[in-house]
Image: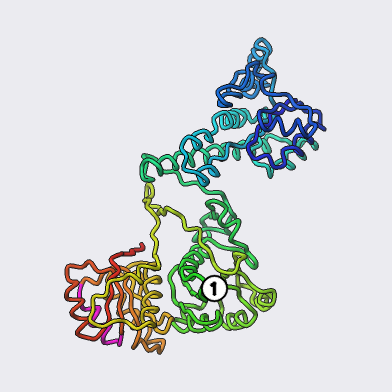
Amino acid sequence: MRALLSVSDKSGIIEFAQGLEKMGWDIISTGGTYKKLNEAGIKVIEIDEVTKFPECFEGRVKTLNPYVHGGILHKRGDEGHVSQAKELGVEGIDLVCVNLYPFKETIERTEDFDEIIENIDIGGPTMVRSAAKNFNDVLIVTDADDYSVVLSALENREDTLEFRRGLMIKAFEHTASYDSMIANYMNGRFNNGFGEYQFITGKKSFQTRYGENPHQDGALYEFDNHFTNNFKQLKGEASFNNINDVNGALKIASSFGDENAVCIVKHGNPCGFALRDTLLDSYVEALKCDPVSAFGGVVAVNGIVDAKLAEKMNEIFLEVVMAADFTTEALEVFEKKKRLKLFAQGGKKLVMSKDAYDFKHVDGGFVYQNSDCICDNEVHNAHKKSELTASAQEMKDLEIAWKVAGLTKSNCVVYVKNSAMVAVGMGMTSRVDAAQCALKKAKEMGLDVSGASMASEAFFPFRDSIDAAAQAGVKAIIEPGGSIRDDEVIEAANEYGISLYFTTVRHFLH
C-alpha cells in the first residue's frame, strides 16, 4: 500500500506518516513535506522517483503526471483498469493526504499579485479531486484533525465505504471552498466584488435543534472561524431563532466600543437599550423601556456578567443572555433558571466579525451588497440645520438613537433620554406610524419622553413627524436629510426650539 503525502500545513504530518509506516505503508512525498519527513527519519520516496520526471518551473509542475494520477484514479476492481495499469507500469496510490497552498494567508498578508498568483495551488486540488473521485479505492485526507481518525480506522480495519465516502465529501468541500475563495478574491480585486458569479461558503459550526419552526432543519455556518473563536454555549442549546435574535442584540450592544451597553431584543427587534456606569444599571434602565416585550427575550451584555447582574436578570424569564463572559458566581446564580440559555464570546467586551459583504435570500436567488456600517463619525460630523445646538447629553442620546435606529428594521424611529432608549417604533410601513407607535408604547409603560432625543434612519418626508415629536417634548432630532421638504422639517424644528442634525447617510434595514 502506498500513500502520497503533500501538505502546506505540516502540523501533525510526521506523526501521521509514522503511523502509516508502522502499518507497512510506503510513503511518497514532495518538496518541503519530503524534506520534513526525511529529516524525521521516515523512509520516504521522493515524487520524481514515481513520476520519472523532475519537478520543474519552480515547483509549478511536480504531481501533474500519469504515474501519479493513474496510480490514484485506476479502479482496482476493474480488470481492464488493472491490466492497463500493469501494462503502463502504473503502481497504485491508495491514500492521498493533501492540504492546499495558503492562499487565504497570502492575501491577508500582501497585495503583491505575483506572490498571490504563486500561492494558487494547482497540483494539490487535482490530486484531491482525483482521490475523491476514486474514493472506493483511495482514502483522501484533507484535514489534519482527521489523521488520528484515519490511522485508527486503518489499524482496526474500519475504513469502510461509508467512512471513505465521508472523507470524499470533505475533500470536495475543501476544493470547492478553496476555488470559491480565489474567484471571490479576483472579483474583489478586479470587479469591485461583483462578478458574474458570487460564491458564499461557510463551515458548519453546529446543528440547531430545528429551523424557525419544528418542521424545518437548521444549522449555523461560519466565516473564518468566527463562531469557533467567539461563541461558547455555556448553558442550553442555541436554536435557529436564538442565533438571529442574538445577532441583532450583538450588533447594537457591540457598537459602543468599551461602554457598558446592554441591549434587549425580542424577535430580532430591540425593546430595550441603555448605557450606564455599570452593567447592572444599564440592564435596569434598558428593561424599563418595554419589560413586557423583554419577557422571554434575548439580552446582549457588552461586558462580563457578575452575580449581582445575574440575580437581577433572574427576576424575569429571559430566553438567552449573550455576554462577553460570565463569572463563575454568575453561572451558579443562573443555574436556578432551567430554561435560560447562556452564550459567551470569552473576552472582556463583545466583538463582531465585521463582514465586508451582506446578502439576503429571495425566491430564486439572493441579493448581495457591501455591508452597511454605522460609523461613530456620522453623528460627530452631522450637519446642524437648526438654530439651536444640542447639549452634550443630547448629542450622546442622538448617537445612541442613531445607532439603534440604523440597526433596526425600517421604518424606524428611536427615542433616547439620558443614554437609555425610552421608545422605539420599527418595521412600520409609515414613518409617522413608527413615531406614533413608539410614543403610544412609551405612554403605556409610563415613560416620560419629554427631553428625549429622536433618530430616524431615513429622512422625514413631511413635517408631521416633527410636530408629533414636539408635542411629546423631544428636544433634539437626527436624521439623514435628503427630502424635497427638508426646508419644512427645518422650519418646524426651529419653530419648536428643537435642535436638528442631518447625517447625509441613510441606513435602511429590511
Q: With respect to residue 92, does 14 lie above or below?
A: below
Q: Position of residue 16 (x, y in %)?
A: 75, 37
**Visible residue check, residue 306:** yes
Q: Position of residue 8 (x, y in %)?
A: 63, 37
Query: Relative to the observer, which residue lies in front, 461 or 260?
Result: 260
Q: Residues within 10 Å of mark 1 (few under 14, many from 20)?
A: many
Label the magenta part by its dominant secondary structure.
Answer: helix
Specify whether 431 is left or right of 341. left
Q: Secondary structure at mark 1?
A: strand
Query: Relative to the observer, which residue lies in front, 445 or 416?
Result: 416
Report the span colored magenta: 462-474
Magenta span includes 464: yes
Magenta span includes 329: no
Instruction: Give the residue number, with chain letter if any, for mark 1.
Output: 301
Residue at 57% over, 28% down: 123
Tally of numbered discs: 1
Q: Position of residue 480 (x, y in %)?
A: 28, 68
Residue at 44% over, 42% down: 184
For the N terminus, give its image quadrant. top right
Specify whether 354 is left or right of 442. right
Q: How is the image coloured?
A: rainbow
Residue at 79% over, 31% down: 42
Query: Relative to the observer, which residue lies in front, 439 or 207?
Result: 439
For the C terminus, give its image quadrant. bottom left
Q: With respect to residue 16, does 425 lie above or below?
A: below
Q: With respect to residue 243, does 418 lie above or below?
A: below
Q: Position of residue 121 (x, y in %)?
A: 55, 33
**Visible residue check, residue 166:** no
User: What amino acid type is highlighted by mark number 1?
Assistant: Val
